[in-house]
Image: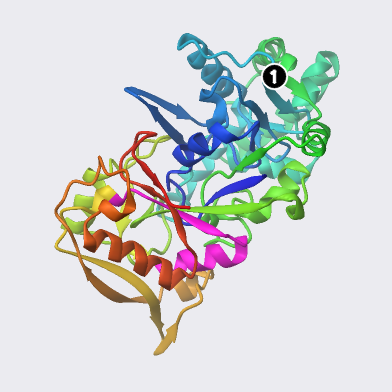
Amino acid sequence: MNTCVVGLQWGDEGKGKVVDILGEHSDIVVRYGGGSNAGHTVVIGDTKFALHLLPSGAVRPNIVCVIANAVVVDPEVLITEINGLAQKGITLDGRLFISENAHVVLDYHKMEDFLREQSLGKGKIGTTVRGIGPCYADKVGRSYAIRMGDLANLDDLRTKLESVIEYKNKIFTAIYNAEPIKAADIFDKCRYYADRLLPFVVDTTEFLHKSIAAGKSVLFEGAQGSLLDLDHGTFPYVTSSNSSTLGLPAGCGVPAKLIDRYLGVAKAYTTRVGAGPFPTEQDNQIGQYIRERGHEYGTTTGRPRRCGWFDAVAASYSVKIGAVDSIALMHLDTVAGLNELKICTAYQIEGQRVTFFPANIRRLAKATPIYETLPGWDDDITSATDFDRLPVNARNYVGRVEQVIGKPVTMLGVGPKRDQTIVRC
């Protein structure tokens, strides 16, 4: 079975844990989009793995890992992650494949990202300043793009970098009054990247098609969340790639019809990092309670996440555009201890009741959530292994989420570790 795991909210839903669990029954795990702005956390025993580019399946020693075409690769981050796993006894030799057509994030992308965000002041988007957007911009612009396959011919790469950096320096100095960068410095780094990473670089589209034809089980891992999708999210407060399931075919060259199951991941509440409308946000004691209980601080940036009630309007939208079959509802343990829980089942926008999520931020900014209120529970559920042994109010909450969204909850997260997961068939 080929499965796609995708976030249904604004990212940080717990996809890393879900992919790690499903990876036990998969041969290959594929990252099909995004870059090092993603932060996927996997906890095994007392060991915590924070991954940004490597697929979450990398922590399982027998799984083949693929970084596909639409991922923008920051070589420094990737090498750091490879070295970090090696220090813990996990090697990727022979089981990591990086697309030769994946684009490369270099220092000037990060500098451009920082300068642009800084110049926007209060109007900034709230990026991770990791060069993701500028790299995707170069990809679309084509003329100044560098791909992983370019590392194989350093003479040509040197010439191209000189042209690229001449152009970038004009922007840095004239528009931002910043210091120019040196092409030689970037090239020296690229020589190091080539030495470390070229052994992993292949045609991943060919590899995936041959693997699927051979009957291999492939797990496709989304980055960020569907509401951050460049075309279908809350633009401009989005990421620079198609982070919903709609990005999978273009991202790795595997048609959607070859995917057997789409699993959407959501928290039992909602979070968001950075700017943008957030109808169910609780900028109060409840939001702070959720933040501290759920350790809601960015894996990539460390920034505190904005927290609020579960938004079924937003999650249902992601289910619809992503053809999601079932849901993994994570962090159910986080909301224990609250007297009551709320689920947003509709919005009030300019006097009208709205149940289809308006991705246009002008409309979304006017949305007032319409809530249903359910009783909470005080019991610690982190050791629960069976759905029927959860407190009745916890079961009722999950059941109401299923009813409102119209899809079954087949996995429940009751803690950060692998074994703190309830699987419902």
Q: Which residues are magenta?
A: 312-332
Q: Quadrant of the N terminus?
A: top right
Residue 107 visible from this viewpoint: yes
197 above or below 58? above
Residue denoted by label 1? 183
Q: Relative to residue 10, is residue 321 drawn left or right?
A: right
Q: Quick one: SS at disc 1?
A: helix
167 above or below 243? above
Q: Relative to residue 167, is residue 335 drawn left or right?
A: left
Q: Relative to residue 363, is residue 74 drawn left or right?
A: right
State which quadrant residue 195 falls in.
top right
Residue 158 visible from this viewpoint: no
Q: Position of residue 387 (x, y in %)?
A: 33, 53
Nearer to me, 36 or 44: 44
Q: Residue at x 46, y 79 (%)?
A: 355
Q: Position of residue 144 (x, y in %)?
A: 77, 35
Q: Residue at x 85, y 19 (%)?
A: 156
Q: Residue at x 51, y 76 (%)?
A: 356
Nearer to me, 383 or 239: 383
Q: Is residue 323 magenta?
A: yes
Q: Position of residue 415 (x, y in %)?
A: 31, 40
Q: Position of residue 78 (x, y in %)?
A: 58, 23
Please name the amino acid that badge 1 sits on. Ala
Q: Is residue 368 magenta?
A: no
